[in-house]
Amino acid sequence: MLLRLGLVLLLVCVASCTLSRSDKKKKVDNSEPASGAVDKDVLERGLVTERPKWKEVVENHAAYHKTSHRAINHMTLAYVTPWNNHGYDVAKLLGGKFTHVSPVWLQVRWGPDGTLVTQGEHDIDQGWVRDVRRAGASAGVKIVPRLLFDGWQPAHFRELFESASKREQLAADIVNLIKKHGFDGIVLEVWSQVPTASLLKRTPTLIRELAMAVREAGYVFILVIPPPVYLKNSPGSFTRVHFQELVDAVDALSLMTYDFSSFQNPGPNSPLWWMKDCVEMLEPDATSPNRAKILMGMNLYGLDHSVTGGSHVLGQQFLQILTTYKPKFTFDRASQEHFIEYKTKTGRHVCFYPTLYSLSVRVNLANDLGTGVSLWEIGQGLDYFYDLL
């Protein structure tokens, strides 16, 4: 498996060994401090290049341009998770970069007595919410926590689908939760949790009912959706038919265009051509206003492939790899992603992790396609990434 990946990467390296004049990178400006707020963004500092160097990443990643200027033409949704709590700081410092911030706090589960229970309120931090609103005042940032259907079995979905009273109660509970905590809406993640095709056929009705209740109460409703196609052109569970059924019922759809490759099939995390295909499969009409409701997913984490399988890589882990092994970056033109290669005692590793350049071409793609962007998630990235948004 790894040998196959190595051959692919070797071909990529051979194919991309020459650069045109326009690809030559600017001289890096190191006159700014290496961390904290600076007066110039990464473009002005000459850091957005197809040929980054490990030392430049290590020395400059923590310096960001604190501004409310936004490069994304449509909605920008930033996820924040309690287990990568640096994202809380990013949202407070750079809230003006995001139109919507979604803390991953809430779950809906079945209680032992057969009732639906919303959990996770103990994670809610109202002080942080106030700080983010203050930082994002220029963008009118909205706080829309994610609500995950967690631990559901097929029988649970069947019971909900067959009980109008349970669906009405769930909708009322969601609206009351939003009101209670002063949120602006909700991000619902349920589609990928539905276990069978027969149950998926009934899921759009549930989503429309929940969305109607939330939106009629004056709040935002965003639905998380999987990609319509995967590796080797394998179809996904969410299709253009589903998109047409639901697009008018929701404010936006958070499209998970990442994890294209896996540890069983090593490769890039989110090839640019695939991201484009996913958007165009859902809405082929480039002039349709529905394009703006698609929030094209951008990963801020990496994938590290090795003979032992692999692992996900967060920003601080990637910096440690760069510092320890001092690897060279290689640019995969097919996917428009960078990767590095390094060796440990257990063998060879190939690691794909976002760079300023790979993120910049994805920002351009979102604007070209007329979509918004969703970021999973801002606690995993490097601080200077957000200059590009």
Image (cartoon, grey):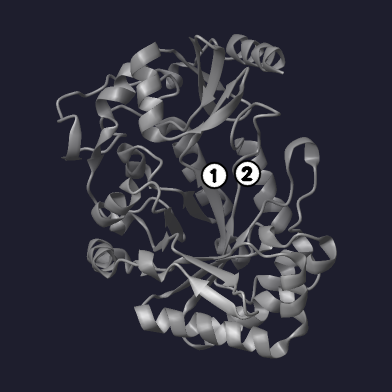
Which of labels 2 and 1 is toward the front? Answer: 2
Q: Is residue 376 left or right of residue 335?
A: left
**What residue type is disc 2 on?**
Met
Q: Is residue 191 left or right of residue 175?
A: right
Could you tell which of marks 2 and 1 lies nearer the N-terminus?
Answer: 2
Q: Is residue 132 left or right of residue 352?
A: left
Q: Pointer 2: residues within 10 angstroms few (<14), some, or many (20+)? A: many
Q: Is residue 147 left or right of residue 57?
A: right
x, y (%) of residue 15?
62, 13
x, y (%) of residue 380?
41, 41
x, y (%) of residue 118?
51, 74
* Quadrant assignment for the N terminus: top right
Residue that numbered label 2 is attached to: 275
Q: Nearer the viewer, residue 44 or 52?
A: 52
Residue that numbered label 1 is attached to: 365
Q: Answer whether residue 116 is visible to the viewer in this image.
A: yes
Is residue 87 positioned above or below 50 on the image?
below
Disc 1 secondary structure class: helix
Q: Answer whether residue 215 is visible to the viewer in this image.
A: no
Residue at 31% over, 55% down: 91
The answer to whether marks 2 and 1 mark residues whose Cβ atoms lie closer than 8 Å is yes
Q: Which image quarter: residue 287?
A: bottom right
Disc 2 secondary structure class: helix
Residue at 61% over, 74% down: 112
Q: Give the Cα separation between the discs numbered 2 and 1.
A: 9 Å
